[in-house]
Amino acid sequence: MGERNHASFGSGPLARKKWTLVIAGTAVVLMVAAVAIQVTRATSAFPQDAGAAARPSQAGRASTSEKPQDTKKVAKVGSVFITYDELATECVERHGEEILDNLVNRKIIQQACDAQGVEVTAVEVEEEILKISKKFGLAKEDWLKMLQAERNVTPSQYQRDIIWPMLALKKLAGEEVTITQKEIEKAFVRNYGQRVKARAIVLDNSRRGQEVWDKANKNPDDFERLVGEHSIDPSSRHLGGVIPPIAKFSGSLELEKAAFKLKEGEISAVIQVGINQFIILKCEGLTEKTETKLEDVRGILEQELREEKVQKAVADVFQQLKDEARVDNYLTNKTTGGERRAAAKPPAKGAAVRPAGATGAARNAGKPIADADDAGETETAAPPRKPAGRPVKGR
């Protein structure tokens, strides 16, 4: 999971694939939640935190002082002191809601680990960092330096805020997965099959989409101009609408079906790919066929699919933990999960965190790697409704 998340540092196939999936409305919210949450207490990986559950968190505070906290001085301007409480109040007003949410996530995962006897050791954390750095062809020290330079993440933050929660959630989810022949075949088509080259106009309004489609359909040669005038996607708009080639089984069935029906030079109908997300494609042909054979890359595909399934299981378990844990947030005056959710839908007796594959109710937004979606199985969009004379798909 961490490896793929870090792959976003540069450009390449993953970055290009990500754009298509984002505009297709396939969310990766839970991956971000599972990887980037601020979890700072590991059971034994960080023994300096021992006993933290029995006392208020002091993370981020200055060294202990015998003076009362409200009189601790953190700066002096002329003859006037700035106290710790003044600083804390300012920080809470600016960032309190976000940081409190991170602290809540910390407690949710740690309590689940404590309840199930899950432990992540310091050795496991170090081994995972070394494994990730090797995948990127870097020494561990160089990898950590790059993280700090490009992401402003210190080595200690990386260990405790990213690697530890990733490993803890993997253990809670269970890493045993099954890869089928059908999944391997689809992954082969997705990664090595022909793709549709296209330009796109991305819109957030169906009515505007119809208006732009009318103009593009009447004058296909004006497509690039219409991209500049109407598309809301800045990256493709500056390229005249050019997007990464669209592959099959890559995340959005509606987008793929429309793209592979087009002939070179044809313009698609308005395709709805998400809530308030609409796309008009102009086909520019297919990519060249590759000579790669499935058996030559089977091992690579199996490893990729295994990682994707584990990531999805991690995201599902984390979402389930959040759903089951009652959280009373006094800063925002909101209560989530636990009893309030149970009032609407009582949980089954003996419900607990289950191994990967046992939850079964994760929503589509929970896919940590968007292209893990089996786009060829079912079509979830509502049946298309076509106003007279204006083709629209997926609305």
Image: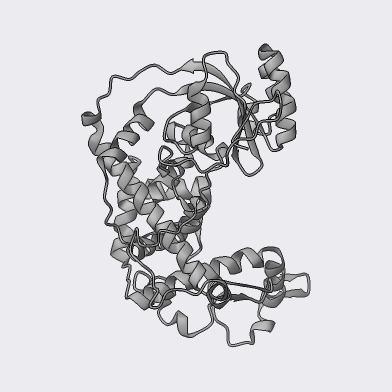
Residue in view at x 31 percent, y 40 percent = 183
Quarter in which the C terminus is drawn: top right
Seen at 64% across and 83% down, the residue is: 69
Is residue 355 shown above or below 178? below
The relative height of residue 96 versus residue 371 in the rendered view (above or below) is: below
At 38% from the left and 72% from the top, the residue drawn is 113
Residue 182 in picture, x, y percent from top left: 29, 38
Q: Dividing the picture into quarters, in which one does residue 359 lie?
A: bottom left
Q: Nearer the viewer, residue 3 or 67?
A: 3
Whether residue 139 appears in this view of the structure is no
Does residue 167 appear to the left or right of 329 in the view shown? left
State left or right for residue 94 relative to residue 104. right
Residue 276 x/y as whole percent? 66, 42
Q: Residue furthest left?
A: 295
Vertical comparison of 34 with 11: above or below: below
Residue 387 locus on image (x, y percent): 70, 30
Number of numbered discs overlaid on the protein picture: 0
Point out the residue furthest to the right here: 79
x 28%, y 43%: residue: 303
Q: Position of residue 189 (x, y in %)?
A: 35, 30
